[in-house]
Every structure is written in C-alpha cells, then in structure tokens.
Image (tube, helix red, strand yellow):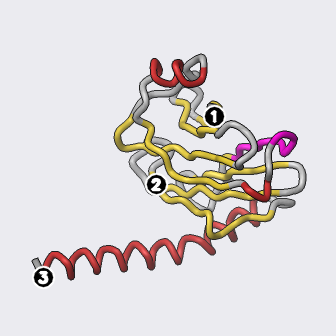
Amino acid sequence: MHFSQKSCLAVCLVLLVNTAWANPAVKKAADQFVGGVAWQAQSVLTADFSCAGKTEHAILGTSDKEIVVAIFTPDLKRAPEVLRFEAGGRKPDAAKIRLEDSSLTPAEITSLAGSAPTGYKPSKTCKGVRLSDDASDAAHIYWDHDSKKFDSWAQ
C-alpha cells in the first residue's frame, strides 16, 4: 500500500509539472497567433480533442465583443483552430472551459439539443470542451469527423 501511494504521488507531481509548463507556453502561442484577445493561462486544458491519439491543448480567451476558444493541434508551432462566440447574450467575464467526455450518442444529443451535430462520433478516448458563462446555454465543442475541424452544439 505504501508503494502505491508513492507511485500515485509521483504521477501527480509529473502531471502538475507538465500542466504548469504547458499553461504559459499555450498562452504565448495563443498570443502569437490570435491577437486582440486576453488569453487565460489558468484555463488551459490538455487532452486528445481531435481523436488523433495525441496530446493537444485548448485555451480560453475573451474580449469585450466575444469569447474565444483556441485548440492547438498537433503542436504549439502551428496556428490553432479558433472558435468565436459573440458576447451578445454571453458574459465574457464569467466564461469558463472544462473537459467533457465525448461519449454521448447522437440520439442522446438529439434529446438534449433537438438534433445531433454533423460529424459527431461518440468516443471513449477523445475529449470535448464545454464552454459556459452563467448567462446562456453551454457550448459543447467537438471534433467534426466529416469536415475534419472543430464545431459546437448548444444545450
């Protein structure tokens, strides 16, 4: 039992160090590729978002007019895919992103949102990004397997 606690502590420490390193690097890359947005280093999420089996990064940014989510695939040296959400009915100051499973079936999404998003495929390994802001329906960002880009659906 003592050994497993040490192992768990070591793994947690490695994850913490990797996350601490990734946050400023992701913010710096977002600043480089997408101007006019206040990127939030503490919002960085790391997962396989495009179902490519690779570690990818997402970051939240805001401006007076919009909420922006940038997803870097496959690395930080290339421009990210950027999803923009108008601030009209949203609150940029309250915006948050978090990881979400991509395991809902199209039928389950249809029951929640009225229709299934194009190109969505359930996955036990890929992750999505949930954008919420306490003012409007959450946006669920997913990898569209048909168009090979990110898209979103609202609930």
Give the amino acid at mark 2: Ala
User: Which residue is farthest left?
Assistant: 1
Question: Which badge, 2 or 1, comes first in the chain's sequence?
Answer: 2
Point out the frontmost of discs 1 and 3.
3
| Residue 146 against residue 74 in the figure, above or below | above
The residue singled out by tag 1 in the image is 151
> Which residue is painted at 15% across and 75% down in the image?
4
Residue bearing mark 2 = 47
Image mark count: 3
Residue 152 picture location, percent across and down: 63, 34
Question: At 65% from the left edge and 32% from the top edge, which residue is drawn?
Answer: 154
* Residue stretch in magenta: 82-89
Secondary structure, mark 2, is strand
Q: Which mark is residue 2?
A: 3
Please name which of the two marks, 2 or 3, marks the residue nearer to the observer: 3
Kind of residue at badge 3: His
Name the secondary structure under disc 1: strand
SS of the residue at dot 3? helix
Image vertical order of residue 14 relative to residue 123, above or below: below
Label 2 – label 3 distance at C-alpha: 30 Å
